[in-house]
Amino acid sequence: MTLTLALTLLLSVLIGISLGLLGGGGSILTVPILTYVAGMNPKEAIAASLFVVGATSAVSAVTHARKKRVQWRTGLVFGAAGMAGAFGGGLLGGHIPGTILMIAFALMMVATSLAMIRGRKNPAGAPHQGDLPVPKVIIEGLVVGLVTGLVGAGGGFLVVPALALLGGLSMPVAVGTSLVVIAMKSFAGLGGYLTTVTLDWTLVGGVTAAAILGSFLGARLAGRIPEAALRKGFGFFVLAMGVFVLAQELPSPANLIMGLTATAIATAAALCWFAIPACPLRRTSLGSPATTTATEAH
């Protein structure tokens, strides 16, 4: 086993931990690992990530289902709509230059990370626990599926909030249900990509096996770690990864400007966090679903 392959497999465990613990983030880790560590081209990395994340999500969903954390009706309705959008996104992505796909992927990472760091305030009133608003879920599923199929990302961290708000699910159940949705639309997106891309299935199989092992650990940790802190910390990590991908893919001097700007913002944020007691970065939304996860999980 080469050092590159060993490092790829080791990092792949983090993919499963993210999916099992947070219900998302798998593709955000998979695509950079396969591109910059394993050496795949962007289209192959995106297609492979759809298989890795789909298979890992399916296995992890079984673990969550045994703990009564999956609402099948909600997941199947959302997932069916997401499959249609993902297949179309996969078809479209196969005809778009790899550099553009990676830039779009990086922008999705940045947007996702900012949403994770900022958190969400509860909407007015308690979540609706009655009938599922099917038209809204179908539209949401189509849009999220299209994004997932196109750039291989944007699944879990868009699905989990949608399930919590539209389906009236608690966060632990939203996480488990999101894994069903992610598996369904990941395989649909993969089907679209395989019309124009071929994969090294030996490597993809190894990465998938490592990710599945990580998913078991993530599922065991779900509900035991304060998710507010975990999600915010992971958000900063995703933000750094997104900036790194942009710096790699943007032409000069745009990549240099991006790097300098990111460094300046990171320095300012660090100074605010450690030197200013009233720093806004320290504030958390008490009504954020992430904050309530640990209490709802038990």
Image: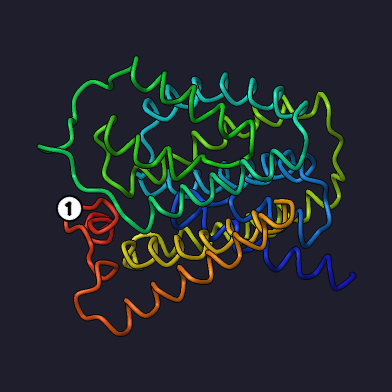
**Left or right of residue 128, residue 39 in this image:** right
Q: Nearer the viewer, residue 233 or 247?
A: 247
Instruction: Identify the residue shown where x is 76% and y is 70%.
Output: 7
Q: Amino acid at mark 1?
A: Gly
Most extreme residue toward the left is 125
Residue tagged by mark 1? 287
Instruction: Identify the residue shown where x is 46% and y is 47%.
Output: 111
Question: In which quadrant of the rendered image does the N terminus lie?
Answer: bottom right
**Left or right of residue 101, residue 204 in this image:** right
Residue 236 position in % (x across, y down): 46, 64
Q: Is residue 289 above or below residue 180?
A: below
Residue 115 position in % (x across, y down): 38, 50
Most extreme residue toward the bottom is 275
Residue 166 position in % (x across, y down): 28, 30
Density class for disc 1 (Cα within 10 Å; few <14, some 14-19, many ≥20) is: few
Within the image, what quadrant is residue 145 found in?
top right
Instruction: Identify the residue shown where x is 38% and y is 72%.
Output: 269
